[in-house]
């Protein structure tokens, strides 16, 4: 295993090796995720204070941070314990007071001797009509005036660490910087007018004005880019290592695809044709595929996945499609069997429900290669599930399957190609940050014939009208979803709300016509309720949480979301995607309690305006931030100190193309720029990627 280069050692030393940082301060800085000198110089000031010298405070607007030359007057120690210590001072036109709490008299006598001149800087404010400065930030003699910066950077702090302590520690950490080569493309540096890495650090820690703290300042953009470039280089190395691992070319003769495509009642969209071409190229190459198929609700991902699976079947292999739940796996089975009929191949499902003789028959047929396509849940991972020749694994809904599960699937065959499908439109910047090691195909069109869904905002006071609308639709043979309010902080209240609504709707529409699904039900009961709805035995499905992504009931044409103001944009968009799947015109009714807050109004109005999931996801990212959008716990997002994934997607895309271009020219990173890039990877803590270069 490679070890960190000696030149970087001083940057990764303990914080206590810096002047002014003892064990206590080091521990407090740990709460800010600062453990080394290198972490310190990537902790940037978030604001600053102008400390330009003024002649007098007379007529100066209050409160304000001021810097002024004064003559020290009388010291007025407190008359009783707990009262402040006051010192009178005078500038060129005004007498005012400095106020100190819990300060020692001898210290203040030395700091501000009566009759002497000093320059002071701090926040001036009016108290009982008199000007005062409490605990000035700076007090210096005239000859030390240069110690007060004209513009002082202010750093984010943690409790117990003073601004001056952090400023000193940062300054000391900057002295540890070694001279490093240039890892960024010189043409890019010239075009963007970026400073060198070292100069950029100097500039961000010594801003001259507020504008210098902007993320668009060349020095800040440079450092953000370095961080994104190191991240994308790591992902590109992982991608390269995976592609180097020999794959198997699967090239079909087209007979199964042609049979299925000819029987389709509609034409493939341009996006489907493009995505299929990208996947076929990957399957036909002797490299392992690792591709993300990203498509909005109803964009036709299942057809693309099926045609990809048929390609490997034509080539003599097998395919598996994984779904996160049994309901979804069975739904895929129905959809795929209905489309794949003309191909006359064997398609089976394997879930936790299979047992005994029936299960043994399936696993036996799978091992002999008699089953061409297997659909399943986590049950597919079990040891006795063996394929004769697994070539393609399709994983539905990436956020339920981690990298570990993908690897376990890969181990089921020799050089298995992986296609991950997600129905959650991901903003470009997050897709690059999370899936940068994967190739991405996007389905950004809906198949012809999908009717738009009418979205309406309905105040709670009009509940009777909503129920009457439901009655009309059900009488005409339609079905409806009713999603109950997301009651903040309380699973119990959410459940109560759902049970109350369920009871009310059963009383109105009849016991057999309403089903209930909630998170605390046993799986079997939940599946049974879902199956009643899918089979059109229940006309209304009441649910607490998001109805399973992918649940497909073409006959359901109404989605009612109660308490819609409590749901996130992406959630509401996914819920709306459950309807509009059949021939009938569909509607989504968003019930809310007026008055709406500004943020809730923006969310609900956007949904009324557009069905474009990609536009919705970008606004969702802007409103909520990356961590909230994906869920911090399983976000998989890297932590950046300087870069901002939410606002710098252009910079992220630039870093990705630069990283991939560098590895195309210099896969072992041995050129002068490649060697500098290795140092950048060590500097940014991507130690694991150094191993990938060596393995390669």
Image (spheres, grey):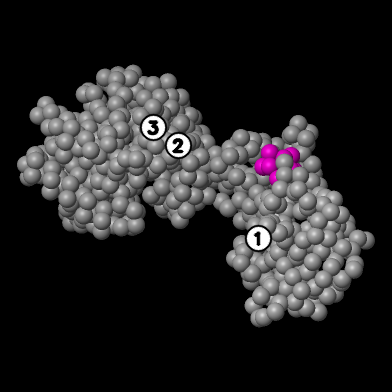
| Image spot of residue 556 (x, y percent) | 20, 33
Look at the image and tell me whether residue 592 can be seen. yes
Query: Quick one: 618 or 667, which is closer to the camera?
Result: 618
Q: Residue furthest right?
A: 143
**Residue at image mark 3:** 605
Q: Mark 1 or 2, which is nearer the eye?
A: 1
Mark positioned earlier in the residue sequence (3 or 1) = 1
* Residue in the picture at 36% in, 21% down: 268
* Residue in the picture at 23% in, 38% down: 461
Quadrant hosting residue 416: top left
Mark positioned earlier in the residue sequence (1 or 2) = 1
- Asked if marks 1 and 2 touch (Cβ < 8 Å), the reply is no
Badge 3: residue crowd in 10 Å (few <14, some 14–19, many ≥20): some
Badge 1: residue crowd in 10 Å (few <14, some 14–19, many ≥20): few
> Is disc 1 placed on a helix, strand or loop?
loop
Residue 552 horizontal side relative to residue 188, left or right:
left
**Residue at image mark 1:** 128
Tag shown at residue 617 = 2
- Asked if marks 3 and 1 touch (Cβ < 8 Å), the reply is no
Residue 281 horizontal side relative to residue 348, left or right:
right
Mark positioned earlier in the residue sequence (3 or 2) = 3
| Image spot of residue 600 (x, y percent) | 39, 40
Number of marks in the rendered image: 3
Q: Residue furthest front?
A: 129
Q: Calculate the distance from the C-alpha at mark 1 to the C-alpha at mark 2.
A: 52 Å
| Image spot of residue 609 (x, y percent) | 39, 27
Residue 682 horizontal side relative to residue 588, left or right:
right
Magenta residue span: 212-220
């Amino acid at each position: 295993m490679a070890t960190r280069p000696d030149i970087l050692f001083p940057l990764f030393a303990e914080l206590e090796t810096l002047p002014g940082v003892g064990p206590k301060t080091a521990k407090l800085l740990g709460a800010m995720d600062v453990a080394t000198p290198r972490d310190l110089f990537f902790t940037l000031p978030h604001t600053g204070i102008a400390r330009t010298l003024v002649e007098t405070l007379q007529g100066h607007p209050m409160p304000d941070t001021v810097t002024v030359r004064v003559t020290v007057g009388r010291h007025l120690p407190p008359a009783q314990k707990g009262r402040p210590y006051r010192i009178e001072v005078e500038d060129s036109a005004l007498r005012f007071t400095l106020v100190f709490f819990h300060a020692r008299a001898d210290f203040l006598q030395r700091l501000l001797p009566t009759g002497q001149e000093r320059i002071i800087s701090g926040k001036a404010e009016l108290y009982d009509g008199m000007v005062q400065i409490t605990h000035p930030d700076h007090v210096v003699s005239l000859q030390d005036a240069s110690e007060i910066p004209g513009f002082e950077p202010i750093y984010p702090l943690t409790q117990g660490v003073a601004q001056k302590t952090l400023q000193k520690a940062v300054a000391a950490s900057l002295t540890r910087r070694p001279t490093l080569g240039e890892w960024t493309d010189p043409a890019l540096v010239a075009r963007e007018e970026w400073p060198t890495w070292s100069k950029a650090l100097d500039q961000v820690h010594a801003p001259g004005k507020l504008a210098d703290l902007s993320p668009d300042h060349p020095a800040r953009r440079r450092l953000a880019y370095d961080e994104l470039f190191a991240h994308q280089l790591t992902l590109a190395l992982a991608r390269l290592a995976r592609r180097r691992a020999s794959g198997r070319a699967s090239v079909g003769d087209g007979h199964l695809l042609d049979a299925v495509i000819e029987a389709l009642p509609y034409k493939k969209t341009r996006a489907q044709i493009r995505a299929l071409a990208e996947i076929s190229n990957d399957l036909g190459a002797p490299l392992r595929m690792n591709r993300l198929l990203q498509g909005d609700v109803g964009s036709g991902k299942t057809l693309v996945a099926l045609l990809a699976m048929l390609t490997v079947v034509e080539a003599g292999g097998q395919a598996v499609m994984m779904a996160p739940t049994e309901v979804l796996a069975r739904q895929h089975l129905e959809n795929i069997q209905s489309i794949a009929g003309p191909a006359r191949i064997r398609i089976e499902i394997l879930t936790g429900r299979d047992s005994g003789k029936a299960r043994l028959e399936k696993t036996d047929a799978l091992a002999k290669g008699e089953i061409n396509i297997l659909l399943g849940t986590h049950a597919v991972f079990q040891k006795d599930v063996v394929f004769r020749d697994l070539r393609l694994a399709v994983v539905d809904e990436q956020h339920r399957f981690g990298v570990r599960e993908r690897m376990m699937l890969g181990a089921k065959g020799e050089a298995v190609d992986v296609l991950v499908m997600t129905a959650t439109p991901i903003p470009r910047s997050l897709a690059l940050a999370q899936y940068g090691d994967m190739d991405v195909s996007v389905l950004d069109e809906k198949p012809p014939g999908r009717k738009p869904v009418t979205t309406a905002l309905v105040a709670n006071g009009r509940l009777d009208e909503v129920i009457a609308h439901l009655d009309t639709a059900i009488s005409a043979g339609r079905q409806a979803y009713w999603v109950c309010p997301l009651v903040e902080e309380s699973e119990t209240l959410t459940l109560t709300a759902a049970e109350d609504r369920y009871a009310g709707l059963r009383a109105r529409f009849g016991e057999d016509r309403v089903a209930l699904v909630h998170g605390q039900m046993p799986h079997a009961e939940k599946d049974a309720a879902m199956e009643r709805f899918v089979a059109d035995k229940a006309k209304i499905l009441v649910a607490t949480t998001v109805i399973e992504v992918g649940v497909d009931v073409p006959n359901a044409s109404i989605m009612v979301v109660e308490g819609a103001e409590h749901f996130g944009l992406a959630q509401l968009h996914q819920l709306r995607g459950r309807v509009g799947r059949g021939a009938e015109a569909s509607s989504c009714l968003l019930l809310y309690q007026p008055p709406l807050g500004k943020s809730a109004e923006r969310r609900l109005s956007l949904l009324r305006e557009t069905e474009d999931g990609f536009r919705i996801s970008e606004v969702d990212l802007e409103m909520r931030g990356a961590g909230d959008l994906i869920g911090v716990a399983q976000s998989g997002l890297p932590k950046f100190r300087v870069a901002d994934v939410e606002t710098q997607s252009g910079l992220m895309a630039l870093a990705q193309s630069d990283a991939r271009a560098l590895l195309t020219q210099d896969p072992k990173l041995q050129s002068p720029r490649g060697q500098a890039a290795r140092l950048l990877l060590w500097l940014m803590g991507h130690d694991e990627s150094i191993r990938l270069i060596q393995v390669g």
